[in-house]
Amino acid sequence: MSPGLLSDKRAVAAIIIGLILAVIAYVFIRPLDRTISYVVYGVALILLVYACVMDIADEFEPEAKPRPTPKVKDIPEPEEEHAEEYVPEVEAPAARLTKLPIETIEGIGEVYGKELRAAGIATVADLMMADTTKVAETCDVNKSQAERWIAMSRFAWLDEVSEEDAEAIVFATGITDLKKLAAASAEDMFNKIKEALDEGDVRVPAGYKFTKDKIQSWIDAAKRLT
C-alpha cells in the first residue's frame, strides 16, 4: 500500500470521528455538562485539524524518482570479415612444396586459408598452380592481391627467402618470378624495399632487417635455379 493511500484513509477516519464527537458533544453532553462538552469539542476539532494536515501533506508529497536505467555497455564493432592474423614463418622454408600449408604465404591467415582449402588449394604447391581468377573469387579479393599471393608462393620454398622476404620481393619490387629475381640489382631492390617499409606498404615483425647482402643471396639463389 502506498503512503499517499494510507494517509488518505487516516484523514477520512479523523473527519468522521471528529464529526461524530461534535454531534455527541452538542446533542447529548452540552445539556448535561458544558465543560465536558467543550473538551469533546476540542477533541473533535483536533481530529479535523489532523485530517486537514494529512490532506495538505499528500499534496506536497514528492513524486517517486524513476529508477535509473542501467547503462548498456558499448557494443564493439564487428571485426573485418577477412582480417588476417600474423602467421609465423615455417621452420623449414625449403620443405617440399606439397608439405607447405597455404598459410605459409604472408597475408593468408586462418580465414583465407579455410576458404582456399575448401576450394582445393591447401598447399603452396597448389597455390603455384592455381588460377588467379579462382583465388580472387574464392577469397573475395581483387586479382592483384591473388596474383601477389601466387607470386609469393614461387619464392616460399627457397632456403634464402622467408615469408617476409617473399612479401617484400613481390610488394616492394614487383618481381613475380625467379627469372626476374635473378636479373635484378641488389642495390635497386634494397632501395625499393626500404621505401616500401617507410611508407607502410610492406610490414614485417619488429626487429626484422633487410640488408643488401641478404637481398644478394636471394638473387644468387634465383640464378642457380634458372
Image: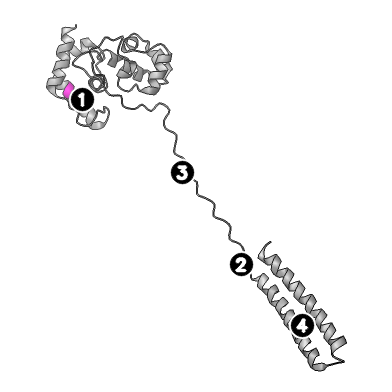
**Which residue shows up at 58% across the image and 57% down it?**
66
Say which quarter of the image contains residue 3: bottom right
Mark 3 residue type: Asp
Q: Amino acid at mark 1?
A: Ile
Q: Position of residue 112 (x, y in %)?
A: 39, 21
Q: Nearer the viewer, mark 1 or mark 3?
A: 3
Q: Tell me the distance, in whole angstroms, between the alpha carbons under discs 4 and 2.
A: 30 Å
**Residue type of the residue flagged with mark 2:** Pro
Q: CA distance from mark 4 to mark 3?
A: 63 Å
Quick check: marks 1 and 4 in contact, CB under 8 Å?
no
Q: Quadrant of the C terminus?
A: top left
Tag 3 or tag 4, which sits nearer the N-term?
Answer: 4
- Sequence-wise, the earlier of marks 4 and 2 is 4
Report the predominant secondary structure element of the magenta stretch: helix
Residue 95 appears left or right of 45? left
Disc 1 to disc 2, C-alpha distance: 74 Å
Identify the residue shown where x is 23% and y is 29%: 197
Residue occupied by mark 1:
193
Viewer-side label of 1, 4: 4
Q: Nearer the viewer, residue 156 or 19?
A: 19
Which of marks 4 and 1 precedes in the sequence? 4
Q: Residue at x 42, y 13 (%)?
A: 119
